[in-house]
């Protein structure tokens, strides 16, 4: 069966060739369910990329309509971190605009079985508010959730509804069921939607971003055997099994496109295979890694990016602009990302400046360096060495071994590497990890090396890395908010799901991600995203175009700009970075 690739509901391209037998393919055999409960190799018949809210919510309404028309025997199953019954779905296929509750109630009246799982989120949102919730009266939030619950239950008995009290709080009290899954079965067609968007007005946005359309997100529509696999996961959540178990008969024979369904879940035996799968593909990358998300803070993902950049892989990361995002105070994320920025940039730096004693500054050039590395816990006795492009030492372990060992350590729940002597009591440990890291180098004429903590590096010139952000000109604090959870590797593999590229998502929250292994789909998806941002398809031209965008006149449009250390700078006394936002989310 040919793979049909759709884009935003506008065009359809038929792909007749199979999966490229490229280099970007993990070699790990499929483990048994007892080893990794929910890493399932499956397949899809069709895959359609859904960019931003207009396309996603139109497709969501279209699926509800199709199931409603099918009537008796059809089903709708939803599992979401957040859902608002008053969400207004756009008019599609001759159906007028209506609310989500109206659409689901109409489907129920037609004989459709509708079941909804929601995270029991009132606990964290009402009783442990994040920084922006302090500005609202608690009673307002309690009244709002009470209203939502009542609406979900009307008419009585028509929609089966369950709250999910995610048990990850045994490890961390702020964890959540963060999945976003919609399953539709008409009897003749089975469709799954998954991605970054919750069911709420906040997630609506046109693909042309402006003040009113600031939310940037992504999802995917899949058909084929992947529906069975995701449906089984949903059923495990509905049944309250902790941890969820994989289906007994994984099968890739049903479609031409391999898809791996991976999860994070720490109920019972911890499952953290989204990180494992992502890092594995990063280690195989030869050409580029492109990522979009609201933040990048997971230590193993960052180190895998450092290693990839060190061997010449182009790394492009798109995040909200720290000084202009509609999120408000971004300092909790920016504090950690400042160190991540430095670490990845140092992988292939051409020169850098650091502050010495008595305010003196020193400049070091790559041409003078014989070998270099990123190290922890001091430069003399560190046993944890991540080599950069200049490193030639035969004594240090390979970067691949270093990353693999770190991933295993975090997967097994051992975060002792983040309890460091410089800051043992930090409220969020990934920050303490990066604070305790430094750059070590030996010049060609020196017998011993020199060490400087990353926080003392003041300027970096690098050929291999930049973080980028969309900036809406002529605004203050209204630039697009990048919420998509996307990673693309070498035009061969795409990750799309609910998981952020953060320590919390990788380590604690319940998350899902689809790993789609089809070169044509990934290339088309990348080109659509680049066109969306007004950026060249050639990755080698990104930096130049982004720097040109810094000097563009104020025309009210969105443009991609490169971030600098100054953009990510956070005052040491920031209450947000050290307080409720950072500690509450474990960044």
Image (cartoon, rainbow, N blue to C red):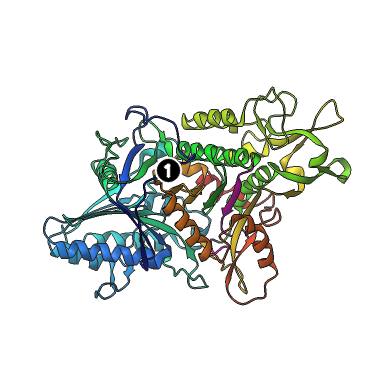
Residue 336 higher or lower than 201, as above or below: above
Q: Disc 1 designates what residue?
A: 509
Q: What secondary structure is found at the residue carrying circle 1?
A: loop
Residue 169 coordinates in the image, percent (x, y):
41, 39
Q: In this rendering, does residue 314 appear at all?
A: yes
Q: Is residue 17 left or right of residue 189?
A: right
Residue 323 coordinates in the image, percent (x, y):
63, 61
Q: Residue at x 66, y 67 (%)?
A: 549
Q: Is residue 210 left or right of residue 92?
A: right
User: Foreground residue, 575 or 421?
Assistant: 421
Residue 471 coordinates in the image, percent (x, y):
60, 66
Numbered range of the magenta stretch: 312-327
Q: Is residue 321 magenta?
A: yes
Please identify the quadrant where the C terminus is shown.
Answer: top right
Q: In this rendering, does residue 222 appear at all?
A: no
Residue 522 coordinates in the image, percent (x, y):
45, 52
How many marks on residues? 1
Residue 117 higher or lower than 170, as above or below: below
Q: Residue at x 67, y 75 (%)?
A: 553
User: Foreground residue, 339 or 249?
Assistant: 249
Q: Residue at x 69, y 32 (%)?
A: 375
Q: Is residue 188 magenta?
A: no
Residue 584 higher or lower than 187, as above or below: above
Q: Is residue 48 left or right of residue 325?
A: left
Q: Quadrant of residue 538?
A: bottom right
Q: Quadrant of residue 157?
A: bottom left
Magenta stretch, main secondary structure class:
loop
Residue 416 higher or lower than 482, as above or below: above
Q: Quadrant of residue 96?
A: bottom left
Question: Mark 1 packing: few (<14 Cα in 10 Å), some, or many (20+)?
Answer: many
Q: Is residue 129 left or right of residue 118?
A: right
């Amino acid at each position: 069966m040919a793979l049909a690739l759709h884009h935003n509901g506008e065009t359809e391209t038929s792909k007749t060739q199979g999966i490229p037998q490229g280099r970007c393919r993990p070699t790990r055999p499929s483990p048994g369910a007892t080893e990794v409960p929910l890493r399932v190799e499956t397949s899809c018949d069709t895959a359609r990329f859904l960019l931003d809210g207009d396309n996603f919510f139109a497709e969501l309404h279209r699926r509800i309509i199709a199931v409603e028309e099918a009537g008796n025997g059809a089903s709708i199953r939803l599992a979401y971190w957040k859902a608002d019954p008053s969400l207004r779905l756009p008019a599609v296929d001759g159906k007028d605009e209506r609310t989500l509750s109206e659409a689901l109630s109409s489907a129920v009246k037609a004989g459709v079985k509708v079941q909804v799982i929601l995270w029991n989120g009132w606990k964290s949102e009402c009783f442990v508010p994040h920084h922006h919730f302090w500005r609202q009266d608690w009673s307002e939030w309690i009244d709002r959730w009470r209203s939502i619950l009542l609406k979900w239950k009307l008419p009585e008995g028509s929609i089966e509804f369950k709250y999910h009290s995610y048990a990850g709080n045994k490890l961390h009290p702020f964890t959540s069921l963060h999945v976003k899954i919609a399953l539709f079965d008409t009897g003749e067609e089975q469709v799954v939607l998954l991605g970054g968007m919750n069911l709420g007005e906040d997630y609506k946005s046109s693909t042309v971003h402006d003040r009113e359309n600031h939310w940037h997100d992504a999802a995917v529509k899949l058909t084929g055997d992947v529906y069975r696999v995701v449906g089984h996961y949903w059923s495990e959540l509905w049944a309250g099994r902790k941890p969820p178990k994989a289906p007994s008969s994984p099968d890739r024979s049903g479609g031409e496109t391999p898809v791996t369904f991976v999860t994070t879940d720490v109920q019972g035996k911890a499952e953290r295979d989204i990180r494992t799968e992502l890092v594995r593909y990063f280690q195989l990358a030869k050409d580029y890694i492109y990522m979009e998300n609201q933040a990048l803070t997971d230590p193993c993902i960052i180190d895998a990016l450092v290693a990839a950049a060190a061997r010449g892989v182009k790394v492009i990361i798109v995040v909200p602009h720290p000084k202009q995002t509609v999120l408000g105070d971004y300092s909790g994320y920016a504090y950690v990302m400042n160190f991540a920025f430095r670490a990845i940039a140092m992988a292939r730096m051409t020169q850098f400046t650091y502050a010495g004693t008595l305010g003196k500054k020193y400049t070091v050039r790559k041409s003078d360096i014989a070998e270099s590395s990123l190290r922890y816990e001091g430069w003399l006795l560190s046993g944890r060495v991540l080599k950069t492009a200049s490193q030639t030492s035969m004594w240090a372990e390979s970067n691949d071994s270093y990353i693999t060992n770190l991933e295993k350590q975090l997967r097994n729940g051992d975060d002792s590497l983040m309890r460091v002597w410089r800051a043992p009591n930090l409220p969020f440990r990934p920050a303490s990890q990066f604070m305790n890291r430094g750059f070590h180098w030996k010049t060609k004429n020196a017998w011993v090396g020199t060490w400087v903590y990353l926080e003392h590096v003041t300027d970096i010139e690098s050929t291999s890395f930049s973080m980028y952000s969309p900036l809406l000109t002529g605004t203050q604090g209204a630039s697009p908010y990048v919420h998509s959870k996307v990673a693309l590797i070498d035009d061969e593999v795409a990750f799309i799901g609910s998981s952020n590229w953060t320590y919390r998502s990788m380590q604690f929250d319940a998350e899902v991600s689809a790993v789609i292994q089809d070169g044509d789909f990934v290339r088309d998806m990348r080109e659509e995203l680049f066109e969306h941002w007004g950026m060249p398809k050639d990755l080698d031209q990104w930096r130049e175009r982004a720097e040109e965008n810094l000097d563009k006149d104020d025309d009210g449009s969105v443009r991609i700009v490169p971030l600098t250390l100054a953009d990510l700078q956070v005052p040491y006394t920031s209450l947000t970075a050290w307080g409720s936002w950072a500690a509450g989310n474990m960044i």
